[in-house]
Every structure is written in structure tokens, then in C-alpha cells.
């Protein structure tokens, strides 16, 4: 490899690699879509079973023009965000509680392990019966998927904080609450961001499963409905939209994470 | 001479599932003002436990500990919080004790200026060298205005070169701030080069084997580096080495 001689050159090389990666990702996507379209047009694959990009796109335009699509997107996004926020917050609060009181943690440990091992989607019908068939039930399914993992992993992160740093705070006379706010939480912000990343996926699964079961609207409903009437265009469109929505949420979180990393740990940007 | 910290026949046992461990047995010594005591002993004998008792992190099983003054604790690792810059790390103790007032802030800034950290106040710990980080850790401890500093193997995480440098640095700071200190170490040279007295401990249950007065003919020019070249150094070294090796096996 060529010797790097200046910081400008180093940055240029890094930037070039970034562009290359992005272009490849876009290229792969286009290649996939074009191949799909071609194979469908040549009748090599069965359009009835797998649909094709142009049909999906036409349907997409139709749904946008009728304004129907936004309603579905809005309700699914709303349910997902609600599930994500409730699941993450409650999970973190319980995680803190377990950290705070080791006895409670010990008592709850086996229950959490069992809850975690249960396939929660199998419980979805019960949860929906309990909470009602509206948004409440669907959000509850989403929460049930993310909360247990959040509790377990946040608790593990909290108890593995460096013992010597805790000891140091104690020598300064810190209370347990101060140890929580000065050390346990701030040192775990990157981990909490990771938990949220995982929970985005979990909440989407919960919402879609919930909508499969009971809903009259939302992306999950579109997919199920499309399947029932054998309109594979509709199913595929739903799947694509799901992918794009999940990607957007992930990107937003990545941006937050990047901002956090940039403002912290480096003097280049002084915090207020 | 004022006595700041006195251990009087202090014993300590730990109770665990596997049984009772007698760690300290009848430890007695006194730390006076303006004095540095080094504690040296085999690993696992209870050196850190002595400091934990002195700072009330643990309670003794029997005996008496008298304290006259505030205690500051410094650890083997600097324990700087990587999400706080140098200044905010130094402020930590004041935040904890809710004494973040103008007077204390001025004191922090005077320390920062005096010990050459003013240009680094906004830096984050991962942007500093190991020696610099240890200095920040010391100033964080000093910010609470302790009378007695407890240092638990404060340099053992540093490489040899840095360690000699930081030892001189910390020694000067402790002396110029007029603090007393107890420094735990497993390095004989380190003990001799900073201490006015060296306490040699035995294996567990740990007793005091010997308390050795360390005196050099250097008057006010004593620094850790200077003592290493002094003629008395080797004698002290041999004495302590012999005491330790009567017990230590590794
Ligand atoms: N909280 C505790 N509970 C039970 N046993 C403990 C506790 N703290 C220390 N001990 C035991 O007491 C003994 C002395 O520990 P201490 O940390 O004081 O030794 P040390 O001389 O500082 O060792 P090192 O050289 O490794 O730093 C060890 O055997 C340790 O296992
Ligand atoms: Mg120790």
C-alpha cells in the first residue's frame, strides 16, 4: 500500500473508502431489483408468487395517491415508538431497581430467565385478550418483547461497572443515589443506546405480530390482508416499507450515537 | 507533632461462606502531620484492608482507630471518568459533597494552574498520558482538602520510566501541599524513596514485623530520585528485603 504522507491524504483515502462502500450498497440494491424485474419479465420466476418491483412500485404510487398508505404507516410507527419507549423505560427502571437491591434481583432472577426463554409471540393472543384488541393490545405485545431483554441486559451492565470506581465514589462520601447518577448511568449510555437499537427490532416484531392478529390498519394488517387475498404485490410492498421504516429509525439512532461520541470523550467539542 | 491517624491494636476478620479469614492482627501505628508512611508486605496480606479501615470503608473487628482530619484516597488506577473532561473529573468530589461553591472552585483552579494542567482542563482522559492522568487523579483527591492521603499502589499500573517520573511528581505535590500520606506498595525502592517510616507486614494474619525509620542526609533537597543515589539507600533496602523474605515465597 502507498505510504500516507499527510493528514489531507489520510482523510481523502478514508472518504474515498466510505463513498465506495455506499456506492456498492446502492449498486447491490439496484442489481437485485433489476435482476428480479428481468427474471419476472422473462417468466423465469412466478410473478404470482413473488411479484415484481415495477408492480410493487405502481401499487405504492396508487396507495400514496389515495392517501391510504400514510394512515397505515402512521399507526404502525406510532405503535412501535410507543412500545419502544415504554419497553425501554420500564425495562431500565426495573434494571435500576434490581441493581439497587440485590435481594430483589436474586428473587426475580429465575422468573426473568423463564420469561426470557418463553417465545413471547406465542403469548401475543393472550396479551391482546387482556389488554384489548386496539392499540393497547398491540403495544403490549411490543412491550412484552423488549422489556425482559432490557431488564436483563441493563441489570448486567449496571452490576459490571468497575468496582474500584464505586469504591472511589464511596471514599468521597457518595450516597447510593449519587453512585447511580454520577457513575452507573453515565458510564452505561453507550450500552443503553445499544439496548434501544435491539429494542427497535423487537418493537417492530411485536407490532407486526399484533397487527397480524387483530388490527384493521397498519403495515402488518396490509401484509396479512395481501396474503389472504393472494395479492403478493401488497405483501411485498408492506415488507419493503417495513424495511425502510426500520432503517430510518436505525439511522436516527446512529446519528444520536455519533453525536454523543463526538461531543463526549474529546476536547474538540466542548460540552456546555 | 500532631497525630492525624492512630491505629491501636486493630484487628480485622472477614466472614465469608468458606469461613473466617483473619486478615489483620493487632496493628498499631501512628501517622503524624507532614509525614509519609510506606506500607510494604506480601501480596494478599491485608495492605488495602488497612487503608479501607482508615477511610471507614470497612469497620475493624476489634481495636481502635483515631482520626483527626479528613481522608483522601487514591487508587492503583486513576479511575478517571472518561465521559468527563479533566476539570469535571476534578470537580467530582465537590459535586458529591455538594460543596461546589466559589471558594472551592477557586481552589481547584489554583491547583490546576499550580500543577500545570490549565491547558488540559478541557481534555478528556483518553487524550492524556498515563502520568498526566495520575496527576489529575491526585488533584481530584486534593480538591476535597484532605489532611491525610491514602495511596494504594498508586503507580503500579504505570511503566517503569513513567513511574519514576510520577513518583517524583506526586511526592513534590504532597510535600508542597503539606499533606501526610500512607502509601501502600510492593516495591521496596519505592517505599524507601518516599517514606519517613516503612511498616513491614508479615503474611496473613498480618502483623507488623518491623517499623523502620528512614532518614537521609539530604535535608530539604530530598526527592525520590535523589534518595536512590544516597549512600543510605542500599542499607535500608537490604534490611527490608531481609524482613520480607523471611516470609515471602514468591
Ligand atoms: N470484603 C472482603 N470480604 C472477604 N474477604 C476479603 C475482603 N476484602 C479483602 N478480603 C481478603 O483479605 C485479604 C487481604 O486483602 P487485601 O486486599 O487487604 O490485601 P492486599 O495486601 O492489599 O493484597 P494485594 O497485594 O493483592 O493488593 C485477602 O485474602 C482478601 O481475600
Ligand atoms: Mg491491595
Image (tube, coloured by chain):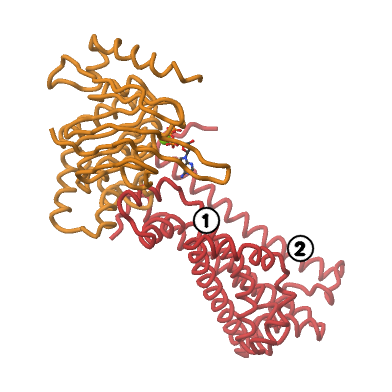
Looking at the image, which is closer to me, B225 or A207? B225
Distance, label 1 to label 2, CA atoms, is: 45 Å
Chain ID for orange: B
In which image quadrant can residue A47 be found?
bottom right
Q: Which mark is residue A35?
A: 2
Q: Is ligand 1 within 8 Å of the beta carbon of the residue shown at mark 2?
A: no
- Residue drawn 64% across the image and 82% down it: A138
- Residue drawn 41% across the image and 25% down it: B202
Colour used to depict chain A in the structure image: red
Above or below residue A14? Residue B164 is: above
Q: Quadrant of the N terminus of chain B?
A: top left
Q: Residues within 10 Å of mark 2 (few under 14, many from 20)?
A: some
Q: Which mark is residue A157?
A: 1
Secondary structure, mark 1, is helix
Q: Chain of mark 2?
A: A
Measured as percent of width and height from the top left, residue A184 is found at 43, 57
A215 left or right, relative to A74: right
Q: Is residue B126 visible?
A: no
Q: Pointer 1 and pointer 2: residues touching (CB < 8 Å)?
A: no
Looking at the image, which is closer to me, A158 or A250? A158
Amino acid at each position: 500500500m502507498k505510504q500516507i504522507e499527510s493528514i489531507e491524504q489520510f482523510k481523502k483515502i478514508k472518504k474515498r473508502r466510505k463513498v465506495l462502500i455506499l456506492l456498492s450498497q446502492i449498486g447491490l440494491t439496484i442489481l437485485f431489483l433489476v435482476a428480479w424485474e428481468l427474471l419476472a419479465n422473462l417468466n423465469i420466476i412466478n410473478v404470482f408468487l413473488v411479484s415484481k418491483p415495477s408492480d410493487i412500485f405502481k401499487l405504492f404510487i396508487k396507495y400514496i395517491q389515495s392517501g391510504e398508505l400514510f394512515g397505515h404507516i402512521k399507526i404502525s410507527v406510532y405503535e412501535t415508538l410507543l412500545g419502544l419507549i415504554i419497553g425501554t423505560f420500564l425495562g431500565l427502571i426495573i434494571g435500576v431497581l434490581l441493581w439497587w437491591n440485590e435481594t430483589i434481583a436474586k428473587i426475580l432472577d429465575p422468573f426473568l430467565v423463564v420469561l426470557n426463554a418463553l417465545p413471547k409471540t406465542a403469548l401475543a393472543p393472550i396479551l391482546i385478550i387482556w389488554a384489548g384488541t386496539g392499540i393497547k393490545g398491540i403495544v403490549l405485545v411490543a412491550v412484552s418483547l423488549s422489556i425482559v431483554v432490557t431488564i436483563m441486559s441493563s441489570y448486567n451492565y449496571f452490576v459490571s461497572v468497575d468496582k474500584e470506581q464505586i469504591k472511589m465514589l464511596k471514599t468521597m462520601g457518595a450516597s447510593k443515589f449519587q453512585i447511580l447518577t454520577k457513575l452507573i448511568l453515565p458510564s452505561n449510555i453507550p450500552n443503553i443506546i445499544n439496548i434501544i437499537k435491539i429494542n427497535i427490532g423487537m418493537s417492530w416484531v411485536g407490532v407486526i405480530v399484533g397487527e397480524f392478529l387483530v388490527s384493521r390498519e397498519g403495515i402488518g394488517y396490509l401484509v396479512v390482508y395481501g396474503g389472504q387475498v393472494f395479492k403478493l404485490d401488497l405483501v411485498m410492498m408492506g415488507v419493503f416499507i417495513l424495511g425502510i421504516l426500520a432503517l430510518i429509525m436505525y439511522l436516527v439512532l446512529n446519528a444520536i450515537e455519533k453525536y454523543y461520541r463526538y461531543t463526549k470523550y474529546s476536547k474538540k467539542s466542548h460540552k456546555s | 507533632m500532631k497525630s492525624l491517624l492512630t491505629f491501636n491494636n486493630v484487628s480485622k476478620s472477614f466472614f465469608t461462606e468458606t469461613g473466617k479469614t483473619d486478615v489483620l492482627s493487632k496493628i498499631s501505628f501512628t501517622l503524624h502531620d507532614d509525614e509519609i508512611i510506606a506500607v510494604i508486605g506480601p501480596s494478599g496480606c491485608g495492605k488495602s484492608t488497612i487503608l479501607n479501615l482508615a477511610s471507614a470503608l470497612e469497620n475493624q473487628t476489634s481495636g481502635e482507630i483515631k482520626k483527626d482530619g479528613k481522608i483522601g484516597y487514591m487508587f492503583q488506577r486513576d479511575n478517571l471518568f472518561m465521559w468527563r473532561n479533566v476539570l469535571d473529573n476534578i470537580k467530582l468530589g465537590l459535586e458529591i459533597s455538594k460543596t461546589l461553591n466559589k471558594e472551592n472552585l477557586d481552589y481547584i483552579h489554583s491547583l490546576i494552574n499550580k500543577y500545570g494542567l490549565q491547558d488540559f482542563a478541557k481534555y478528556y482522559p483518553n487524550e492524556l498520558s498515563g502520568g498526566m492522568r495520575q496527576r489529575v487523579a491526585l488533584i481530584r483527591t486534593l480538591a476535597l482538602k484532605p489532611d491525610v492521603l491514602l495511596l494504594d499502589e498508586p503507580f503500579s499500573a504505570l511503566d517503569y520510566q513513567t513511574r519514576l517520573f510520577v513518583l517524583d511528581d506526586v511526592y513534590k505535590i504532597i510535600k508542597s501541599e503539606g499533606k501526610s500520606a500512607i502509601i501502600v506498595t510492593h516495591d521496596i525502592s519505592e517505599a524507601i524513596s518516599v517514606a519517613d517510616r516503612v511498616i513491614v507486614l508479615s503474611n496473613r494474619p498480618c502483623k507488623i514485623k518491623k517499623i523502620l525509620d528512614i532518614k537521609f542526609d539530604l535535608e530539604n533537597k530530598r526527592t525520590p530520585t535523589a534518595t536512590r543515589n544516597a549512600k543510605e539507600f542500599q542499607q535500608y533496602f537490604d534490611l527490608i528485603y531481609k524482613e520480607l523474605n523471611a516470609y515471602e515465597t514468591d
